[in-house]
Image (cartoon, rainbow, N blue to C red):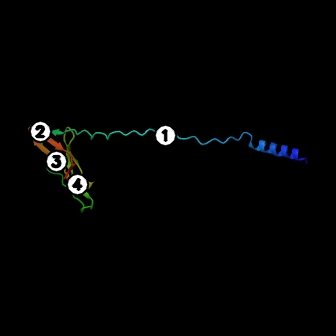
Amino acid sequence: MSSRLAGLLIAATVIATTAGCVVEPPPRPHPRPVVYAPPPPPPEVVEVIAPQPPPPAVVEVVQESRPGYVWARGYWHWNGRRYVSVAGHWEPVRPGYHYVHPHWEQRGDGWHFHVGVWVNG
C-alpha cells in the first residue's frame, strides 16, 4: 500500500469516527437571585373577653420535671359560648427568659385572657 493511500485511509477513518461529534459544555445554571426579606411581623394577638369568670383552675397531673423544659399549665378557653378546658404542655426552656402562664384577668368590661408568653429576664 502506498503511503499516500495509507494517509488517506487514516484521514478517512479519523473523519468517519469523529464526524458529527460535537462536545458542548454542560449548560451553566442561572444563578437564582437572593432576596433578603425582613422577618415576618409577630402574629396578631386577638384579645378574648368573656362575660363571666372562668371555672376553677384546671386540675392536671404533671409528670416529673423534664430537664430543659417548663410545664405550661392548662387553662380555660372561652369559645364564644362557654369555657373549654385546654390541657397543659411542655415548653422548651429559653435561656434569658421566664415563662408567664396563660391566665384570666378581670377588668371593668369582663374577663380578659392573656396567652402564655416568654418574657425577657
Res. 100 mark: none
The amino acid type found where label 1 is placed reads Pro
Residue ID for mark 4:
96
Determine whether 38 is above or below 97 in the image.
above
The amino acid type found where label 3 is placed reads His
Q: Position of residue 26 (x, y in %)?
A: 59, 42
Q: Gap in Å between the C-alphas at discs 2 and 4? A: 34 Å
Residue ID for mark 2:
110
Q: Position of residue 22 (x, y in %)?
A: 68, 40
Q: Position of residue 83 (x, y in %)?
A: 19, 43
Query: Pointer 3 and pointer 4: residues touching (CB < 8 Å)?
Result: no
Residue ID for mark 1:
31
At 90% from the left and 47% from the top, the residue drawn is 2
The amino acid type found where label 4 is placed reads Gly
**Callout 2 secondary element:** strand
Foreground pick, 119 / 56: 119
At 15% from the left and 45% from the top, the residue drawn is 104
Query: Pointer 1 and pointer 2: residues touching (CB < 8 Å)?
Result: no
Q: Gap in Å between the C-alphas at discs 4 and 1? A: 40 Å
Q: Looking at the image, tell me whether mark 1 or mark 2 is earlier in sequence order.
A: 1
Q: Looking at the image, tell me whether mark 3 or mark 4 is earlier in sequence order.
A: 4
Residue lying farthest to the right in this orientation: 1
Residue lying farthest to the front in this orientation: 3
Query: How many C-alpha atoms fall within 10 Å of the one at disc 1: few (<14), some, or many (≥20)?
Result: few
Foreground pick, 67 / 34: 34
Residue lying farthest to the left in this orientation: 108
Residue ID for mark 3:
103
The amino acid type found where label 2 is placed reads Gly
Determine whether 47 is above or below 118 in the image.
above
Give the label, 2 or 4, closer to the camera: 4
